[in-house]
Image (cartoon, rainbow, N blue to C red):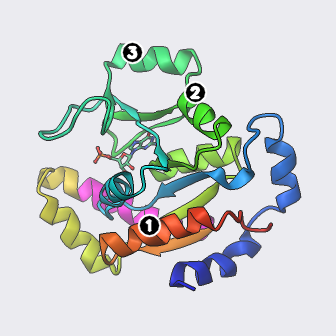
Amino acid sequence: MTQSSDRFTQRSDRLTPSSDRLTQSSDRVPAPPSRLTVLAGPTAVGKGTVTAWVREHHPEIWISVSVTTRRRRPGEQDGVHYRYVSESEFDRLVADDELLEWAVVHRGARYGTPRRPVEEALAEGRPALLEIDLQGARQVREQMPEALFVFLAPPSWEELVRRLVGRGTEDAAERERRLQSARAELAAEPEFHATVVNRRIHDAGEELVDLMRSGASPGQ
Ligand code: 5GP
C-alpha cells in the first residue's frame, strides 16, 4: 500500500462515525458516499498541477470548474480552468444559493464551487473531484461530511517556499501573504482523511486516484 493509504488508516480515528455521515447524506446524494473527493492543501503546493494531471490521464473523473472573480491569467481558458465572473455575478450566485461553498482566497478574489454540477455528477455515479482552498473544504465538510478529504502536502517547508517564489506570478507583498496563509494551512493537515505528498506530479496524481478508487470513506 502507498504511504497515503497508511496515513489514511491512521487518521480514521479523527472522523465522525460513518453511520452519522450516512444518515446526514441519505436525502441529498443517492450515489455511494465516497464518490466526492475534496483536494485541498497549502498555497503553491501544486493542487492545480496535480488536478490538471488527473484531468488529462483520468477522463472518467469529473472535475469541478470553479467560478472566480480574479482575472484570467495567460494560458487559462474560461470554462476550463475557471469560469471568470464579475463581482456582481458572484453576488448573485451567492444570493441564489448556487454555490456549494465559496471563500475569499489570499484576501483577494472570491472563488466558489457551483453546486448543481457537483450534484449532477454524483447523481450520475461519476467520481467527482473538487480542488479548493481550506476554507472551502471546511464548508463542504459541513454539507457533505461523507466526502473523502485529501490533503496535498509539500515534501518540506523549504520546497513549498521554493515553489511559491519559483512560480513568479505574485509580487513580494502577495508572496508574503501567501506564506502566512500556507503556515496556517499546513497546520490543518490532521483535519483530513488522507495525505498525499506532492514529490512528483505523476505519483501524487496516481495516489489521489487510488484513494478515490478505494471507495472507502474512513470509518466504513
Ligand atoms: P489560483 O488563483 O492560484 O488559481 O488559486 C488560488 C487558490 O484558490 C487555490 O488555493 C485554489 O485551491 C483555490 N480555489 C480554486 N477554486 C476554488 C473554489 O471553488 N473554492 C475555494 N474555496 N477555493 C478555490
Please state which of residues 47 and 95 is positioned toward the viewer in this rendering.
47
- Would you name the residue on which mark 3 appears? 89
Q: Residue at x 35, y 80 (%)?
A: 155
Q: Earlier in the sequence, mark 1 or mark 3?
A: 3
Q: Is residue 57 left or right of residue 158?
A: right
- Would you name the residue on which mark 1 appears? 152
Q: Is residue 198 above or below residue 134?
A: below
Q: Earlier in the sequence, mark 3 or mark 2?
A: 3
Work out how far the residue at label 2 is from the one at label 1, CA to CA, in angstroms.
Answer: 26 Å
Please state which of residues 146 and 52 is positioned toward the viewer in this rendering.
52
Q: Which mark is residue 116?
A: 2
Q: Residue at x 43, y 70 (%)?
A: 206
Q: Residues within 10 Å of mark 3 (few under 14, many from 20)?
A: some
Q: Is residue 89 above or below residue 129?
A: above
Work out how far the residue at label 3 is from the one at label 2, CA to CA, in angstroms.
Answer: 16 Å
Q: Earlier in the sequence, mark 2 or mark 1?
A: 2
Q: Quadrant of the C terminus?
A: bottom right
Answer whether residue 192 is magenta in the image.
no
Mark 1: is the Cβ under 8 angstroms from ligand 1?
A: no
In the rendered image, residue 152, in percent from the top left (x then y), is placed at: 44, 67
Amino acid at dot 3:
Glu
Q: Is residue 25 above or below residue 17?
A: above
Magenta residue span: 176-191
Please state which of residues 183 and 145 is positioned toward the viewer in this rendering.
145
User: Which image quadrant for residue 49?
Assistant: bottom left
